Amino acid sequence: MICVLSIFQLYFSGMKTARDFIRNVNNTVTSFINGYFRKFYVVVDVLSSIPEVRYAPYLTDEERRKVLEIYRIFQEADRDIYYLYSGYENGLLLINDYEPAEGYDPRVRPWCRAALESRPKPTGGIPYREFKTKELLFSVSKVITDDEGNVTGVISVETLLERLLSNFPHSFDNHETVTEPQPRKLFPFRGIGLLWC
């Protein structure tokens, strides 16, 4: 009887350790993701307030080139920014070093629709496939408005999945992950074996 109680105590102790570890991992991942995307929220907030970005459809080509130069400066300042651009209600797209595919309409892209739905807040790093290359991107976008609050477009900053993962903390390298043959539960352990009863 004592042996059975000891086994149950060991089992429940191991389960508590596993739950605590998973909770800590989830907290770490959540903190990392929030911190990683925070800088992108700042970028879209700052750029969406610049008059030249807000009124780009009504500007000359020379004035639009100044907007693209601002975008380039932001991209060069942060290697995690893969694309930085704005799409407008009239179909205009302002982006550096990218030639849209035929039929591309910024107004129907996921980053634009998500920004319209989350207005006035920026979107929260939505994943989607790039139109031409099909690369997996994560986008933070925000609606651009005129002085009367009318939507003129959407600004978006994006990162590649690979860039996000390359910044991911490697603090879990010393942990093993054990899964059941039919994955239903995840049991990460730190030097603790899995006891099946």
Image: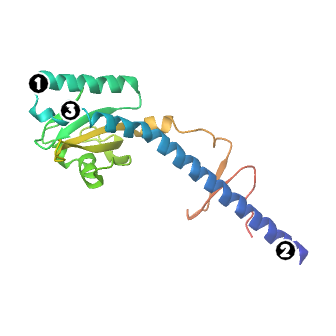
Residue contact between numbered discs 3 and 2, judged by CB atoms under 8 Å: no
From the viewer's perspective, is residue 67 above or below residue 165? above
Q: From the top left corner, tell me how far across and down residue 154 is, in percent.
A: 23, 42
Measure the C-alpha gap from mark 3 to mark 2.
Answer: 71 Å
Please tell me whether mark 1 sits on a helix, a strand or a loop: helix
Q: Name the residue under label 2.
A: 5
Left of 46 or right of it: where is 116?
left
Q: Mark 1 points at which residue?
A: 61
Q: Residue placed at 31% from the left, 33% from the top?
A: 83
Instruction: Looking at the image, tell me whether mark 1 or mark 3 is earlier in sequence order.
Output: 3
Q: Mark 1 or mark 3, which is nearer to you?
A: 3
Q: Mark 3 points at which residue?
A: 51
Can you tell which quarter of the image residue 85 is in? top left
* Kind of residue sitting beneath label 1: Asp
Q: From the top left corner, tell me how far across and down residue 156 is, in percent.
A: 29, 39
Instruction: Looking at the image, tell me whether mark 3 or mark 2 is earlier in sequence order.
Output: 2
Can you tell which quarter of the image residue 9 is in? bottom right
Q: Residue placed at 20% from the left, 32% from the top?
A: 51
Q: Nearer the viewer, residue 43 or 149?
A: 149
* Mark 2 surroundings: few (<14), some (14-19) or many (≥20) residues within 10 A: few
Which residue appears farthest toward the right when viewing the image? 2
Q: Residue placed at 75% from the left, 67% from the top?
A: 12
* Mark 1 surroundings: few (<14), some (14-19) or many (≥20) residues within 10 A: few
From the viewer's perspective, is residue 16 above or below residue 48? below
Left of 106 or right of it: where is 133?
right
- Viewport quadrant of the N terminus: bottom right
* Kind of residue sitting beneath label 3: Pro
* Kind of residue sitting beneath label 2: Leu
Please tell me whether mark 3 sits on a helix, a strand or a loop: helix
Q: From the top left corner, tell me how far across and down residue 112 is, in percent.
A: 24, 47
